[in-house]
Every structure is written in structure tokens, then in C-alpha cells.
């Protein structure tokens, strides 16, 4: 699956999202539960702000010295008998992964959840050389057997589906015969996938954090699928975005603690697995061969810019879970495998503004994302920076250009401003019904298409304020 | 083998607007270190009480016993889980804790470094896998397992149920103490770490279907911690 997903038009995607009542309810309730769980986890830790500051400091230091830490990481992986491939582009990464698969004469590849392999379309690359690629994360598996439905959330990829839809997919594609009870559905997937794990030639994983000092990679999961993918197949390929490195195990402690709490409100997930090289002499399980693929694919362009801190992201989705826009439009509307506030920041950085110019506007700039971020990425400020860049490149919609130009002209003259605010109720009266505006003109259209806008007050703020001050008389002095 | 590193890192340094760095970087002294204050002065008994509470949150059964009661405690768990076949690590602590007779029972297999395919197969077929814990984290209810040839990864993963024997002396406040110890191993030996270090917190689970928690996905579907007083 490439990074860009769904219908090419942002408006079409949003319209589809808004009409999907189940998805919107599911997202709302998921956001509530995840927010609550994170809040509780923060409280239990006590001094959350200190933890955030420390996490930010760790990420900033690592990214400032990213070449040093990647060098150290690769030295240590190699010292432990692993292979390291530095991939400038998605194509480079896929070419190497295909080469390994062909050398191993691999027929079956089992994968644990990994966003970066989605980003580079690794599955398609492996399929092109005759490998069957099987997703083993339950959510990803559901999406894969449902004709490759795209993920809508980076932690809970099948969030937009209900259990009846999942049951129907299992019936249609896998001959399932039981109910829509999640327990039964999960047990069915466990049995099917256990066979696949035992047969797979290669296990592919992502990487939550690589530890430079020891050449280790860490995987943070609940289901245990990443453990299976790195215990049974003879060859392990781990694909990591180049920013996903920490200096030592001491920093790993902090960032894993923050990731688990921020993503799902757990103190630690069921499994945090640190893997160093391939199996050791005498080991019976674990891979005989280990390959680490370190992917740039546009990330280095972000270094040294005002957006560098976007690379601090630890993929917890806390920003997604508090975003009021995500709540209404859902993950698919973003048209990227990275949705929500971090997606709106990151996607245009990795792929350019041309295809993603609407994303920085898919935000109310309420800053809930920035407050939620465990590594203190100033997400909403970055969205404003994107908007500025886009406006400077004149990529904004015509009506916004006119509206902003009009506002600039009007606001620059006190007399015109005074007149325009006085005439607003009158000018908008054709669009007003029962005290609200249902089909507003120009820049209001985007808003009123999906919700009402309150009618303009007959009394302006300026007049109300003047009136109030005069009523107070001299008393306030 | 390392491929394409030089060009890749040169580009990174160029983007950062400075010469490349492959040596001489020191970690900063971080301004805050809240991780060291968590349960700082807690006794082993206080840590044990926290571990016990946390087991409720992570859907894990909890037992506490003396050195002499350990075999009986395991039998109780096997009975409760209606489990018969067992696989254990090949770990000298089984002997030290008086479990060598247990390991000789007919329905109990011991991880065998010599015969590759058979150990994995046995683990796959076993009802229960039993390991010791190397570090135990009170805060999160986590057992930390360091692999070696006798301590296979599959024992805590493939069987339907999992039992961790926790010597009370392995209790520490949180992940910090375990990662500090691992960090010291890296610095001291300069040699490689165990190929697999697992932090295990209860049975496997998933919430991928409508965010409903399902306990038991790819790993064990039920887990029990047995805390043992040290001799």
C-alpha cells in the first residue's frame, strides 16, 4: 500500500467519511476511551510534564546527532553478525528486500505491524517476486483479507470497521462459521495465523526504537505476533524509518514508557521485545539471519528545517486521539497512511504539497494535539507553518485568496471594517434560516456544507462592548 | 555487511548543515530524571504489594509461596488451567528451587538446545510453558526474560498458558532498573547482549475489533505469576 490512499479528491474523501455514521461513532467512542486511558496513565506517573521534557530532550539530542547514532547502530548490528542496508528511497529498500527474499527462495513472508513497510509498498514489491505476504497484526490482517482496505489509525488500523463487517469478511474469505463475538473472531484468526507462522520463510517487522549502543531493535506489541515473526522464521528483516533510533537502553526505557502510556494507557504493553542480531551459537529458536533496512524516503529533507521536530514522533497516535477534526472525518479522509495531526504535518513533508495541500487545513488549530504529544512536537504551530508555505506558493483555493485579500483590504481601513461588520447580518440574510446559516457563500461553504453556522448577531461586538462600558460608567476606573 | 552507509550519512549531515559525525558525541546530562524517583525507597514487600495489584490490571493470576511450596503451587495452576503437558526452560534455577523432580515428570519437557526442531515442536504442543523471571518490574507487572540456549524464546510464547516463577529478589520498581542493568552489560562486556530480551506483561491481548479487549491472541491466552520467597 503506498503512502497515499483512497480517492484522489480530499473533498470526496471527507464527504464519504462524514456520511459513514458507524465509523464516526466508532471513532468518537475510541477517542473517548483512549483519551481517558492516557489521562489515567499520566496521573499514575505523577509528574507527566517532567517525563515529557525529558522525552523531548532525548529526541532532540538524537536527531541533532542522527548520523552518529545510525553509524553506531550499524556498526553494532554488523558486529553481531547482522546485515545493514541504508536505503535512500522506497525503491532502494524494496530492491534489497526482494533480493533477500529471492536468495532465500522464500515463498511465504509473515509480517508484524509496520507503518514504514506500508509507506514504501513493500508487500506489493514482495508479491511481484512471487512471495505471499501475510499480515499478522489482527487489525492489519482484517484489512488485508478485506481486499486491502487501507488503515485508518496508526495504532488501531481497523478502527473504522464494526464486528459484523469483520465477521462477514471472515465468512466470505476464510470460511468462518461462528458469531461476531470479538473473542471468537480473534480465536479463529489465532488458529489460522499460527499455521502461517510455522510455515513462513521470512519474518518482517517494523521497529519502534533501535538502540545504537548495542545494535538492538525493540518491538512494542500486545498480540505477540511480532514475537512469533522473530522466533519461528529462519530469516528476519526489520525495516525502520531512519529517525527511529535511541542512544542507549536508558533512553529506551523513557520512550517505551511514554509510548505505551500515550498510545493505549498501559504502563507497558504485553510484550516489549529487544532483539540483538540473529540467534546466538547454540540457540534453537530465533532467526539464523538478520537484516536491518534503514529507510530515508524523504525524511532527511526535514532535517535542518523548521519542521525537524516532526521527526521526533514516536507514533503513539495521542494527537489523533484528541483531534476534533479526525473525530468527524475519520482516518481515510486524510488520504495518507499517516492520518490526524501528525499525518497532516508529516505527509506533505514526505510527499510534497501538490497532492496534500488540504491537509494542513484539516485542523481547527485548537492545539489539543500539541498538548497531547508525549515528546512535545509543536504540531499546531507546524500546521500554521505549512499554511504559510502553501499561501506563499499560492496554492490556496481561489475563494480563500479572495476572502483573505478582501479581508486585508477591509481590515486595513477602519471605515470599511466598521461598515462591513455592520452590514454582515444584512448581507448574509439570504442564507439565513431559523437563526442559522445553512448554505453559506464563498469561504463559508466548506463549513456550512456539513453543519450550520450561527446567524450573525444584529449587535456587533464593538457596539456591545461600547454599550457595556458606558453602562459601567466611571465605576470601573 | 553494511551497505550504502557513507552516502546516506553524508546526505544526512549535509541536510543538518554541518560536517558528518561518526565519533565524539556524548549524551547530554538530561535536565530531569523522573524515572529514578518512582518507588525509590520501596522495600521488597512494598514492591510485591504493587505487583500483586497490577496483576489485576493485566489479567494475570497471582500466587505467592515459599521455597518448599513451589511445586504444589505449580500443580494448583495446572489443575486450574486443566493443563497436562508442560515445557520448561533448561535453567539451573529449576534445580536450585527444588524442581528437578518436577522436570523429570513424564508430561514435562525441558528445552533442549541440541535437537532444534523438536524443542519448538514440543513448545507448540505444550499446554503450559514455565520460565523463571530475570528481573521483575513491580510498577507494570512485568517479567523480564534474557534468552540463551537453554532459555528458548518459544517457551513463554507458543504454549496456550504461561507460568513465570518470580524469585522475590528479582523485584525492582520499574523498567528503569532493568534497562540500567542491560546498559551496564553493554558497557562492561563490550560483547553482545542476549539475542532476545523480552519484557512480558501478562498474557497476549488485542483490542483491534471495536476496541474490545480480547485476552489471548498469538501468544498465551492466560498467564500466572508465582512469587517465591528466596532462601
Image: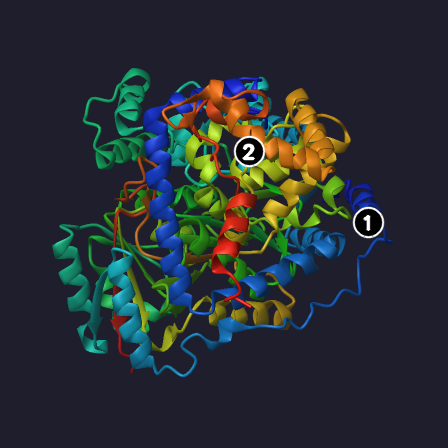
Secondary element under disc 2, as helix, strand or loop, is loop
Which quadrant: the N terminus of chain A?
top right
Left or right, A381 with respect to B202, comes to right
Secondary element under disc 1, as helix, strand or loop, is helix
Q: Which residue is mark 1?
A: B13
Q: Which residue is mark 2?
A: A362
Image quadrant where residue B151 sits: bottom left
Residue name at image x 47 percent, y 77 percent: B37
Picture disc at residue B192:
none
Q: Chain for mark 1?
A: B
Which quadrant: the C terminus of chain A?
bottom right
Left or right, B84 with respect to A7, comes to left
Left or right, A393 with respect to A387, comes to right
Q: Nearer the viewer, mark 2 or mark 1?
A: 2
Tell me, yes or no, if residue A131 can be seen here.
Answer: no
Number of dots carrying numbers = 2
Q: Chain for mark 2?
A: A
Amino acid at each position: 500500500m503506498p503512502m497515499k490512499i483512497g480517492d484522489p479528491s480530499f473533498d470526496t474523501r471527507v464527504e464519504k467519511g462524514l456520511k459513514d455514521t458507524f465509523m464516526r461513532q466508532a471513532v468518537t467512542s475510541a477517542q473517548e476511551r483512549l483519551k481517558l486511558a492516557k489521562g489515567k496513565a499520566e496521573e499514575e506517573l505523577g509528574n507527566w510534564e517532567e517525563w515529557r521534557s525529558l522525552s523531548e530532550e532525548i529526541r532532540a539530542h538524537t536527531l541533532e546527532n542522527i548520523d552518529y547514532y545510525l553509524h553506531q547502530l550499524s556498526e553494532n548490528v554488523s558486529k553481531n553478525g547482522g546485515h545493514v542496508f541504508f536505503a535512500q528511497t522506497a525503491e532502494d529498500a524494496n530492491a534489497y528486500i526482494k533480493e533477500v527474499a529471492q536468495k532465500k527462495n522464500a515463498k511465504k513472508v509473515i509480517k508484524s505491524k509496520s507503518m514504514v513497510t506500508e509507506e514504501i509498498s513493500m508487500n506489493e514489491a514482495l508479491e511481484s517476486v512471487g512471495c505471499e505476504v501475510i499480515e499478522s497484526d489482527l487489525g492489519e490482517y482484517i484489512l488485508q483479507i478485506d481486499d486491502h482496505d487501507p488503515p485508518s489509525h496508526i495504532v488501531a488500523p481497523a478502527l473504522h470497521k464494526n464486528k459484523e463487517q469483520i465477521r462477514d469478511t471472515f465468512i466470505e474469505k476464510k470460511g468462518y462459521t461462528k458469531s461476531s463475538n470479538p473473542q471468537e473472531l480473534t480465536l479463529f484468526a489465532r488458529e489460522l495465523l499460527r499455521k502461517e507462522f510455522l510455515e513462513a520463510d521470512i519474518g518482517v517487522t517494523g521497529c519502534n526504537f533501535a538502540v545504537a549502543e548495542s545494535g538492538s531493535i525493540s518491538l512494542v506489541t500486545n498480540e505477540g505476533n511480532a514475537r512469533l515473526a522473530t522466533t519461528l522464521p529462519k530469516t528476519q528483516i526489520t525495516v525502520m524509518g531512519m529517525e527511529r533510533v535511541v542512544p542507549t537502553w536508558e533512553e529506551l526505557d523513557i520512550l517505551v514508557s511514554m509510548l505505551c502510556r500515550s498510545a493505549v494507557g498501559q504502563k507497558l504493553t504485553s510484550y516489549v521485545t529487544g532483539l540483538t542480531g540473529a540467534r546466538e551459537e547454540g540457540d534453537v529458536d530465533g532467526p539464523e539471519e538478520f537484516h536491518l533496512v534503514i529507510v530515508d524516503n524523504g525524511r532527511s529533507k526535514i532535517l535542518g528545517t523548521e519542521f525537524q521536530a516532526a521527526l521526533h514522533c514516536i507514533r503513539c497516535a495521542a494527537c489523533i486521539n484528541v483531534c476534533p477534526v479526525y473525530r468527524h472525518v475519520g482516518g481515510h479522509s486524510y488520504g495518507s497512511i499517516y492520518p490526524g495531526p501528525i499525518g497532516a504535518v508529516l505527509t506533505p513533508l514526505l510527499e510534497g504539497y501538490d497532492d496534500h495541500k488540504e491537509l494542513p487545513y484539516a485542523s481547527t488549530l485548537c492545539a489539543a494535539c500539541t498538548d497531547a504529544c508525549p515528546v512535545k512536537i509543536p504540531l499546531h504551530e507546524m500546521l500554521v507553518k505549512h499554511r504559510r508555505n502553501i499561501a506563499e506558493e499560492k496554492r490556496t483555493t481561489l475563494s480563500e485568496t479572495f476572502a483573505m485579500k478582501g479581508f486585508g483590504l477591509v481590515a486595513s481601513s477602519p471605515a470599511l471594517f466598521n461598515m462591513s461588520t455592520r452590514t454582515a447580518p444584512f448581507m448574509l440574510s439570504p442564507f439565513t434560516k431559523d437563526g442559522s446559516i445553512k448554505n453559506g457563500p464563498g469561504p463559508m461553504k466548506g463549513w456550512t456544507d456539513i453543519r450550520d453556522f450561527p446567524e450573525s448577531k444584529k449587535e456587533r461586538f464593538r457596539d456591545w462592548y461600547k454599550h457595556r462600558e458606558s453602562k459601567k460608567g466611571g465605576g470601573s476606573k | 555487511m553494511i551497505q550504502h552507509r557513507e552516502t546516506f550519512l553524508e546526505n544526512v549531515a549535509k541536510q543538518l548543515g554541518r560536517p558528518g559525525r561518526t565519533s565524539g558525541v556524548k549524551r547530554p546530562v538530561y535536565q530531569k530524571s523522573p524515572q529514578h524517583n518512582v518507588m525509590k525507597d520501596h522495600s521488597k514487600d512494598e514492591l510485591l504489594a504493587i505487583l500483586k495489584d497490577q496483576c489485576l490490571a493485566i489479567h494475570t493470576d497471582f500466587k505467592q509461596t515459599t521455597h518448599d511450596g513451589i511445586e504444589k503451587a505449580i500443580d494448583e495452576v495446572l489443575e486450574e488451567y486443566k493443563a497436562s503437558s508442560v515445557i520448561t526452560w533448561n535453567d539451573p534455577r529449576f534445580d536450585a528451587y527444588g524442581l528437578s523432580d518436577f522436570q523429570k515428570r513424564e508430561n514435562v519437557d525441558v528445552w533442549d538446545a541440541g535437537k532444534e526442531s523438536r524443542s519448538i515442536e514440543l513448545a507448540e504442543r505444550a499446554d503450559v510453558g514455565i520460565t523463571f523471571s530475570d528481573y521483575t518490574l513491580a510498577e507494570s507487572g512485568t517479567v523480564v526474560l534474557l534468552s540463551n540456549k537453554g532459555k528458548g524464546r518459544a517457551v513463554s510464547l507458543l504454549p496456550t498458558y504461561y507460568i513465570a516463577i518470580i524469585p522475590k529478589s528479582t523485584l525492582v520498581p520499574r523498567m528503569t532498573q532493568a534497562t540500567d542493568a542491560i546498559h551496564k552489560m553493554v558497557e562492561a562486556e563490550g560483547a553482545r547482549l542476549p539475542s532476545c530480551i523480552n519484557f512480558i506483561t501478562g498474557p497476549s491481548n488485542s483490542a483491534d475489533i471495536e476496541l474490545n479487549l480480547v485476552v489471548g491472541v498469538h501468544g498465551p491466552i492466560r498467564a500466572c505469576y508465582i512469587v517465591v520467597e528466596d532462601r
